Image: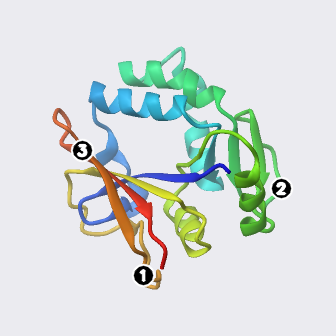
């Protein structure tokens, strides 16, 4: 049975986006962090995004193979572009950044069906809203939080106030010295 891994970039104060949906705080150059992300992408079968995140990333990644912003993006672009993309959306419409399929009519059942297929994990890059819905439905098996050394003081939190209590077990912590980013990996614990 495949697992769902939630991989999110968050600030020290738990924000997935800064005020005004700002993401410039995640713009770091760190070869070790890029290597971690490349290894992660090499070991999953598909990426899951919310519609907004998918559309935002589709504006950059398809062209990043020929015009990357960083050396890390040059390495990551073929991986990001080549992996299947699963887009969580209730809205029908064109998914131009391929290969891509849409789910979202009955998220719990659709993700359960994906998890029952043979293969490697699915990586949920999503956006905060989609990530919170996966957490609400208890669909996340592993949490990978890349904590960036910044306090945003507002924005879009990854965890909602009404999230129910979850017990997690720390399985790994990896500091990336150049950027100051720290990876925290947690496994879901039974309630």
Q: Earlier in the sequence, mark 3 or mark 2?
A: 2
Tell me the number on the disc at residue 165. 1
The residues tagged by marks 3 and 2 sit, at their Cα atoms, a distance apart of: 37 Å
| Residue 95 percent across, percent down from the top left | 76, 42
Q: Is residue 80 above or below residue 113?
A: above
Q: Which of marks 1 and 2 is nearer the N terminus?
A: 2
**Does residue 165 appear anywhere in the picture?**
yes
Q: In this view, does 25 lie above or below 128?
A: above
Q: Residue at label 3?
A: 181
Q: What element carries label 2?
A: loop
Q: Is mark 3 on a helix, strand or loop?
A: strand
Q: Check if mark 1's residue and mark 2's residue have beta carbons within 8 Å.
A: no
Q: In this view, does 116 lie above or below 68?
A: below
Q: Which of marks 3 and 1 is nearer the N terminus?
A: 1
| Residue 140 percent across, percent down from the top left | 55, 62
Q: Is mark 1 on a helix, strand or loop?
A: loop
| Residue 18 falls in image quadrant | bottom left
**Does residue 70 appear anywhere in the picture?**
no
Residue for point 52% across, 49% down: 125
Tell me the number on the disc at residue 92. 2
In the image, 146 versus 98, the foreground residue is 146
| Residue 152 falls in image quadrant | bottom left
In the image, 67 versus 185, the foreground residue is 185
Residue for point 62% across, 39% down: 120
The residues tagged by marks 1 and 2 sit, at their Cα atoms, a distance apart of: 34 Å
The residue mark sitting in front, 1 or 2, is 1
Tell me the number on the disc at residue 189. none
Please say which color scheme the image uses.
rainbow
């Amino acid at each position: 049975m495949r697992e769902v891994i939630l991989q999110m970039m968050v600030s020290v104060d738990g924000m997935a986006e800064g005020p005004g949906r700002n993401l410039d705080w995640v713009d770091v150059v760190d070869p070790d962090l890029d290597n971690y992300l490349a290894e992660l992408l090499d070991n999953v079968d598909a990426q899951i995004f919310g519609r907004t995140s998918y559309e935002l990333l589709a504006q950059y990644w398809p062209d990043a193979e020929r015009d990357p912003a960083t050396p890390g993006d040059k390495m990551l672009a073929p991986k990001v572009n080549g992996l299947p993309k699963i887009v969580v959306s209730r809205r029908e419409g064109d998914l131009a950044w391929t290969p891509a399929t849409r789910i979202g009519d009955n998220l719990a059942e659709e993700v359960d069906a994906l998890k029952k297929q043979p293969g490697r994990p699915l990586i949920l890059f999503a956006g905060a809203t989609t990530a919170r819905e996966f957490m609400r439905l208890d669909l996340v098996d592993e949490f990978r939080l890349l904590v960036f050394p910044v306090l945003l003081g507002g924005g879009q939190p990854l965890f909602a106030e009404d999230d129910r209590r979850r017990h997690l077990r720390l399985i790994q912590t990896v500091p990336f010295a150049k950027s100051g980013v720290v990876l925290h990996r947690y496994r879901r614990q039974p309630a």
